[in-house]
Image (cartoon, rainbow, N blue to C red):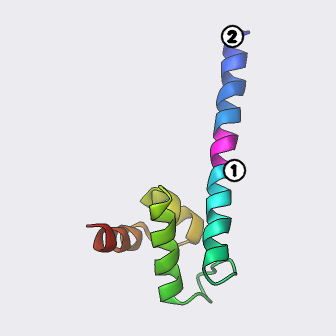
Amino acid sequence: MTSSVQTIEKIEHDAESKVRQLTDLVNAVDEGSGKVPKSNSTEVGDKKDMVLRLGEMGWSADEIAAKINMDLSSIQTILSSFNG
């Protein structure tokens, strides 16, 4: 019974974390161009701004890369050039 409760609590925590990330992403998009970024149609500057906004919100480079479909090394370069 205890392990079932712990499992449910972990699932709940993970779900809350994902909802916060989704909210951050939607807010970042709303502050930017007003549209969801797509790798084929988004300007480079728009993606750079999105990376910086999400980084400022505490997202890791891995999380940003997964959400906006951009390679990890590019994300790390953008974040380090503006934060370092």
Mark 1 vs 2, N-terminal side = 2
Res. 70 visible in picture: no
Quarter of the figure that contains the C terminus: bottom left
Position of 74 relative to 25 (above/below)? below
Amino acid marked by disc 2 = Thr
Position of 64 relative to 2 (above/below)? below
Local crowd size for mark 2, using a 10 Å CA cut-off: few (<14), some (14–19), many (≥20): few
Residue receiving disc 1: 19
Position of 83 relative to 11 (above/below)? below
Q: Which of marks 1 and 2 is in front?
A: 1
Residue receiving disc 2: 2
Q: Residue reaching furthest left?
A: 84
Quarter of the figure that contains the N terminus: top right
Relative side of 12 to 79, left or right: right
Position of 43 relative to 72 (above/below)? below
Disc 1, disc 2: CB below 8 Å? no
- In terms of secondary structure, what is the magenta stretch mainly? helix
The residues bearing labels 1 and 2 have C-alpha atoms spaced at a distance of: 26 Å
Q: For numbered disc 2, what is the local secondary structure?
A: helix
* Quadrant housing residue 3: top right
Relative side of 3 to 82, left or right: right
Q: Residue 32 carries which label?
A: none
Picture coordinates of residue 44, whole percent (x, y): 48, 87
Picture coordinates of residue 59, whole percent (x, y): 49, 57
Amino acid marked by disc 1 = Val
Q: Count the labels in the image.
A: 2
Picture coordinates of residue 77, whole percent (x, y): 33, 72
Which range is magenta?
14-19
Q: For numbered disc 1, what is the local secondary structure?
A: helix
Res. 43 visible in picture: yes
